[in-house]
């Protein structure tokens, strides 16, 4: 698909230049998303999203919009207004709605087969207790009970 609203084509085409001057929100099509996200909120307040804009122009503006942070309330409200205008225009003209972006699949961790806190069920807690007991037993064999810290750790495990 050929991009019409590039900075060079806006300057070279007088009709396009006049249209962009009349509706400054069309400049958002030609800008990079990283520049759009840095724009000041007062810039978004000047955009009116006039009814004279076509549905294709509105969709092109929306497609070029980045995801704003939650604290950029004016920018987020501009995008919501833009979405409402697109819905309004598409319902009036019976134009099919633009395809929705596929939501990212959420990864779910599998649950263990036996989950519980008692050592009898064989869950994660029981495995940790077995490993801790093995470590304490190995430490008890090496020291032969001479230090008080190993006897203390063996006592706390029981």
Image (cartoon, helix red, strand yellow):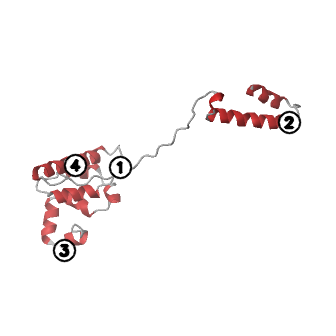
Q: Residue at x 12, y 69 (%)?
A: 15
Q: Is residue 24 visible?
A: no
Query: Which SS class for mark 2?
Result: helix
Q: Earlier in the sequence, mark 2 or mark 4?
A: 4
Number of the front mark, 4 or 1: 1
Query: Which SS class for mark 4?
Result: helix
Q: Please say if the residues under marks 3 and 1 sit with CB atoms less than 8 Å apart.
A: no
The residue singled out by tag 3 in the image is: 12
The residue singled out by tag 1 in the image is: 103
Measure how far apart labels 2 and 4 are at the Cα level.
71 Å
Query: Which SS class for mark 1?
Result: loop
The residue singled out by tag 4 in the image is: 83
Measure how far apart labels 3 and 2 are at the Cα level.
87 Å
Measure how far apart labels 4 and 3 are at the Cα level.
30 Å
> Toward the viewer: 31 or 63?
63
Q: Does 64 sit left or right of 10 as displayed?
A: right
Estimate how packed mark 4 is, as few (under 14), some (14 to 19) or many (20 or more) residues with alpha carbons within 10 Å: some
Q: Earlier in the sequence, mark 3 or mark 2?
A: 3
Number of the front mark, 4 or 3: 4
Q: Please say if the residues under marks 4 and 3 sit with CB atoms less than 8 Å apart.
A: no
Measure how far apart labels 3 and 1 are at the Cα level.
39 Å
The residue singled out by tag 2 in the image is: 141
């Amino acid at each position: 698909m050929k991009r019409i609203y590039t900075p060079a084509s806006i300057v070279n085409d007088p009709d396009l230049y006049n249209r962009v001057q009349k509706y400054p929100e069309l400049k958002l099509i030609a800008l990079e998303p990283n520049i759009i996200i840095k724009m000041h909120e007062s810039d978004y307040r000047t955009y009116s999203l006039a009814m004279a804009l076509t549905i294709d122009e509105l969709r092109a503006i929306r497609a070029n919009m980045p995801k704003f942070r939650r604290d950029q309330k004016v920018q987020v409200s501009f995008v919501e207004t833009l979405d409402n205008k697109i819905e309004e225009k598409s319902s009036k003209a019976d134009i099919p709605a633009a395809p929705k972006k596929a939501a990212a699949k959420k990864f779910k961790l599998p649950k263990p087969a036996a989950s519980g806190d008692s050592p009898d069920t064989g869950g994660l807690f029981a495995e940790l207790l077995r490993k801790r007991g093995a470590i304490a037993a190995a430490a008890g064999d090496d020291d032969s009970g001479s230090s008080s810290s190993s006897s203390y750790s063996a006592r706390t495990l029981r």
